[in-house]
């Protein structure tokens, strides 16, 4: 599965699709300040109002007989006008922030759900793991087992975990759709959180998505990798038998990457939608690269080099017939 850019969904990473939030959803933005609050923030120093009133009540007469307002009254009116402008400005800004936050919730419910799982009716099963309410003891135990196994796979491959992403786990389609999920088994949201559908509640899918998050947690300085490498590595980490032969096999490839592999997210979505074998081809390429360059240690070296400004195409060499596009 692919990991979301802003955000993106593994296989078909859609963040759009407005769905109503669960009951009890808190305000999605700052509350506009009350007029009283704004008024108090611009209040005159204590004791000056009486002086202003006394001065403003007096009238002064010029030599030609015309009457003018006292300077104190002008100052008071100036402050009052300033307070009104300031209050309206704050209210307008708050309204814009609220509208923007509400737009995010409606357009990208998965982002909102991973930010506030409880707002979508999920309850914390264990630190960082959220599930729908009303699960049986057996269901809760199964979720815990899947999460623990997946975390161990990722930790074992990377030599530890640098991130602790939230996991939102649904055992019903209704729950998964409510938090912004679609037809995929699971997704990595903004490479920071993971959502699992009822069809993805197994160690393979969970560790695949967690691998996306772990890789991007380790990349620094704006470094990135092509989509084929990200996805192929996730297949290797999760040890997905659909796309790779067992680790004991001399060559784990089930499908040779005889053509260009997708580099960008758009290319990946198109290629994977047309050819499910895209996962197997990418996993084959990554598996061979790891075997030829020292295994997992090669990945750590690559991540460090990318963080230091190295170019992926210069660091990762592939056979001419397997050369990715881009």
Image (tube, rainbow, N blue to C red):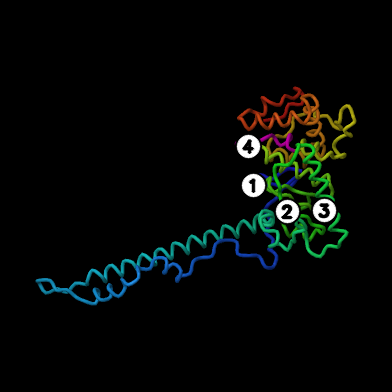
Q: Quadrant of the N terminus?
A: top right
Disc 2 designates what residue? 128
Q: Residues within 10 Å of mark 2 (few under 14, many from 20)?
A: few
In the picture, measured across the screen, residue 240 lies left or right of residue 13, that is right
Q: Of all residues shown, which one is farthest toward the left? A: 63
Cα–Cα span, label 1 and label 4: 17 Å
Figure quadrant of residue 265:
top right
User: Front-most of 314 and 193?
Assistant: 193
In the picture, measured across the screen, residue 278 lies left or right of residue 97, that is right
Q: Which of marks 4 and 1 precedes in the sequence?
A: 1
Q: Is residue 41 above or below residue 156?
A: below
Cα–Cα span, label 1 and label 3: 28 Å
Disc 4 designates what residue? 220
Q: Give the range drawn in magenta.
A: 221-230
Q: Where is residue 229 in the image (x, y as percent from the top left)?
A: 73, 34
Cα–Cα span, label 4 and label 2: 23 Å
Q: Which of marks 3 and 2 precedes in the sequence?
A: 2
Disc 1 designates what residue? 6
Q: Position of residue 94 (x, y in %)?
A: 51, 62
In the picture, measured across the screen, residue 264 lies left or right of residue 172, that is left
Cα–Cα span, label 4 and label 3: 31 Å
């Amino acid at each position: 599965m692919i990991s979301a850019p802003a955000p993106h969904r593994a296989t078909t990473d859609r963040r759009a699709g407005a769905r109503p939030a669960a009951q009890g959803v808190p305000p999605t933005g700052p509350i506009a300040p009350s007029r009283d609050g704004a008024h108090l923030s611009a209040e005159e120093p204590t004791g000056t109002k009486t002086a202003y009133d006394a001065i403003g009540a007096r009238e002064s007469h010029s030599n030609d007989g015309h009457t003018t307002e006292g300077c104190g009254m002008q100052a008071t009116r100036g402050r009052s006008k300033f307070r009104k402008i300031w209050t309206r400005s704050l209210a307008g800004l708050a309204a814009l922030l609220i509208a923007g936050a509400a737009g995010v919730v409606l357009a990208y419910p998965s982002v909102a759900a991973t930010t506030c799982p409880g707002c979508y009716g999920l309850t914390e099963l264990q630190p960082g793991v959220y599930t729908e309410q009303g699960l049986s003891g057996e269901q809760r135990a199964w979720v815990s087992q899947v999460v623990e196994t997946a975390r161990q796979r990722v930790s074992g491959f990377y030599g530890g975990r640098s991130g602790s992403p939230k996991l939102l786990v649904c055992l019903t389609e209704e729950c998964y759709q409510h938090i912004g999920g679609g037809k995929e088994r699971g997704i990595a949201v903004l490479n920071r959180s993971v959502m699992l559908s009822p069809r993805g509640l197994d160690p393979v899918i969970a560790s695949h998505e967690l691998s996306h998050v772990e890789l991007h947690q380790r990349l620094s300085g704006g470094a990135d990798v092509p989509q084929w490498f990200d996805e192929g590595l996730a297949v290797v980490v999760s040890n997905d038998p659909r796309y790779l032969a067992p680790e004991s096999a001399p060559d784990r490839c089930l499908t040779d990457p005889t053509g260009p592999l997708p580099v960008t997210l758009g290319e990946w979505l198109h290629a994977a939608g047309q050819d499910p074998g895209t996962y197997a081809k990418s996993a084959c390429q990554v598996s061979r690269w790891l075997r030829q360059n020292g295994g997992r240690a090669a990945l750590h070296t690559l991540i460090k080099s990318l963080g230091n400004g190295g170019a992926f195409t210069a660091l990762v060499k592939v056979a001419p017939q397997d050369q990715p596009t881009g």
